Amino acid sequence: MKKKVIALALALSMVVAGCTPAKPGDNNGGSDASTEASTSADASSDASSQDSADDQQAATDATGGMPWIDSDIQENILSVTNPSYKDDFNVAVNQEWAKTASIPDGYSSYGEFSAVSDIIKEKGIAALEDDSIEGHDAELARAYYNAYKDWDQRNELGLTPLKEILDDISTISTLDDLSAFFCDPERSFYVTTLVGVGNDTDLVESDKYVTYVTNPSFLLGDAAEYSEMTDTGEALKAGYLDLFTKLMTRMGYTEDEASAMYDSSFEFETQLAESSLTNEEGNSPDIYDKILNYYAPDELADLAPNFPIVDVIASVGYDKANKYLVMEPDAIKKISDLYTEENVAQIKDYLFVMTTLSMAGMLDEESFNDYLEMENSVYGSSGRLSDEEYAYSSAKSNLCEPVEKLYMAKYDATEVKADVTGICEDVVDVYREMLAAEDWLSDETKEYAIAKLDNIKINVVSPDKWLDYSSLDFTGMSYYEMKRALADFELKLDVSHTNGVVDKEIWDFSTLDTNAYYSPVDNSINILLGILDGNFYSPDMTKEEMYGGIGVVIGHEISHAFDTSGAQFDKDGNYANWWTDEDYAAFQDRAQKLIDYYNGITVYGDVKVNGANIQTEAIADMAGMKAMLTLAAKEENFDYEVFFKSFAQDWRGICYFEIESYYLQQDTHPLDYLRTNVTCQQFEEFYTAFDVKEGDGMYLAPEDRVAVW
């Protein structure tokens, strides 16, 4: 299953930590529009020619900043004259690149991650279009890819699939009608059913599945937006209203009717948000104590006395579970409180809005283009990608293993896997030295930390075991029918996991993503094939370039085992405390110093970083750098200038103001220019390499440096 139940909770960033931000296009409640339309696989991007009045205003809004200008904005990085490595390292290294960089159509950002992602995408499209590659998985992947691009067939179907669902919802007039609808999976298949259910890894017993009961995600991404809306929230609200109105008027509703439904639905979401976790709460180190709420089957009904929760769970086949994990009991209680006869009309409006928006990208070309237009308006991008790019991205997201197998049949990665695995093993060895040298840790905690390190599973390029897709058949199906068949296949597979044992040999993400991950629930680092190109990896790289590229990424991912989230899981991936009280308190104090430092950074105007939101990724950035510097110290004549410049090039990028604002407000990663500058200024090797002294912009006094490890 590629879209984990855990990912529905705000604790996602704490469960699987990656080195690049989540894409905002994924926040739409499940629409199958492009996973690359709103942003690249990078956190960075290019705002090459913003000539409109709106873009000029965005650039003006992004000026200022302390201690550095926000050089992710192209106008800002180009405005610096005579850049100096000593004052703003990111600008000095990346300004020449930014002078000629541009954001392609369909992107709101572009940088090194984007460039590598494009390399992988071009090769992936070539693999999907290679009819000579045989096998059932290849046939599935090609059929899906081709059906996605078949606009004649999709246009012929038009909005019919959506209209049939909405017409059915329209027949609901009582609470009993609504309950009957929710408990009939054939009728409610594509509908947000208020309470979700599915199996995933148990955080306490990570070798077992547990059945999660979840509440819906929010259109605006963060529950906090409903009490104090940011500019990003305002843009999302307006963008989704425009998209919803376009689709509804095509089906015969008036703009006033659409607007009234949307306002009603938004009010319902606002009430749900009152009892739901915010992103900041989800990023807090104590999140697990809040979300690990286990219920026996006979206790669920008492949790939601008004909502038919037991019947809904049974209707989709999860009624045999021994126990249920309810991440947000207060949210489920709130749903139950709102589930009354008086609120039936408002709940129907909510179902209309959420279903329409979630299906927008899987229907005809007009609705797909309307969805892209909405994303462009929210995230600052313009234009669109090719149909082949959208089809590839959708196939990669929805049919991970078949597409991966097809790709690897065309491009052998055996040597790359062996080489990068060796690098990972070297970095693990270095972490052993680093942990042993930490004088603020007791011997007891060090001993367990090293045991956890020794137990880390290294996953590189591809899994050794794959899901079996032999029972899935797309013969004669339209794209919409394939989507339904795939969803049925995944549901059947997930239900079969009830009370079962997790097979940790099967990966739960696409290795063609330009990213890398640490997973605390199996204590694994996952270095994906999709990042092993460009500035990150080449077998012809110098040692300095390799260390500054994929080396720092590997170090970053290993460190997540010991950040404020991963440190709460033991060597086997179970949520368990292995720290002494004194050591954990010291660890939190060190993390707080990092948070406080980031809180003091002004990005533009009077807008500051929220250090609590980005603490885990910032800790990982610094620890990854320390690991590679520890390795570098073992090398003769190591060129630290080349190393640090290579690292800065990893995070080079330029982006539109809108997407920068989104990342600043809702992402768990520091902004790109800060990932370069703040990370580098923690290490004495940087000061020596570039002769940085007190008074320089990159200088941070030794006593003020905030690296946790």
Image (cartoon, rainbow, N blue to C red):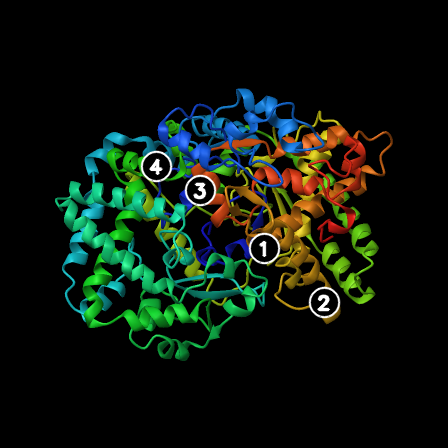
Gap between marks 4 and 1, in whole Å? Answer: 41 Å
Q: Amino acid at mark 3?
A: Ser
Q: Earlier in the sequence, mark 4 or mark 1?
A: 4
Which residue has dot 4 on it? 377
Disc 1 to disc 2: CB gap under 8 Å: no
Tag 2 or tag 3, which sits nearer the N-term?
Answer: 3
The label shown at residue 397 is 3
Nearer the observer, disc 4 or disc 1?
Answer: 4
Q: SS class of the residue under badge 4?
A: helix
Identify the residue at image location x=83%, y=58%. Answer: 439
Of badges 3 and 1, the one in the foreground is 3
Q: Is residue 479 above or below residue 79?
A: below
Badge 3 marks a residue whose secondary structure is: helix
In the visual, does 36 lie left or right of 95?
Answer: left
What separation in Å lies between label 1 and label 2 (alpha carbons)? 26 Å
Judge the density around disc 4: few (<14), some (14-19), many (≥20) Cα neighbours within 10 Å.
some
